[in-house]
Amino acid sequence: MLYLDPPAVPSRGRLWSHLISDLSYAELHAFAEALGVPRRGFDRDHYDIPAERVPMAVWLGARLVPSREIVLLLRAAGLRRPKPRTASVPAAREAGISAGSRVPG
């Protein structure tokens, strides 16, 4: 089954929803392609869907659920891919890196 939450995330002058599958990433990619969403809209375990595509996604069979259910559904399906943890400010201080310093590249 495919799920999306109501458009509520503002970015680039639009509101966005999250589209997920509780079955597989293959199902998610196929649905997004049918919806006309480019692959660049995929972010680890979901697609970012602009508000204007939500009615079509629902028409194609996605179920609209509250935002808090998106992560719960992904975890229950074993498909959650959380963002990598980044070093915290205290950890950086312990390493001797100040907030304004540049890391050589």
Image (spheres, rainbow, N blue to C red):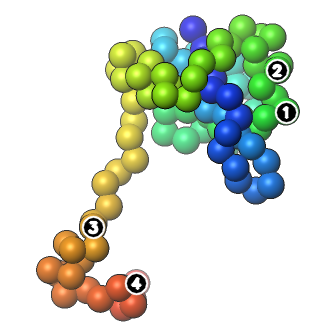
| Percent x, y of residue 66 | 57, 23
> Please, is residue 9 above or below residue 67 in the view?
below
* Crowd class of label 1 (few under 14; some 14 to 19; many from 20; radius 10 Å): few
Reading the image, the residue beneath label 2 is 55
> Please, is residue 52 above or below residue 104 in the view?
above
Q: Nearer the viewer, mark 4 or mark 3?
A: 3
Asked if the residue under mark 1 is in contact with the one under mark 2, i.e. CB atoms within 8 Å, the reply is yes
Left or right of 47, for residue 71: left
Query: Which element carries disc 4, helix, strand or loop?
Result: loop
Reading the image, the residue beneath label 1 is 52
Q: Amino acid at mark 4?
A: Gly
| Percent x, y of residue 99 | 35, 85
Q: What separation in Å lies between label 1 and label 4 (alpha carbons)?
A: 41 Å
Q: Amino acid at mark 3?
A: Ser
Q: Is residue 79 visible?
A: no
Marking on residue 105: 4
Query: Which element carries disc 2, helix, strand or loop?
Result: helix
Q: Which residue: 17% across, 81% down?
A: 95
Asked if the residue under mark 3 is in contact with the one under mark 2, i.e. CB atoms within 8 Å, the reply is no
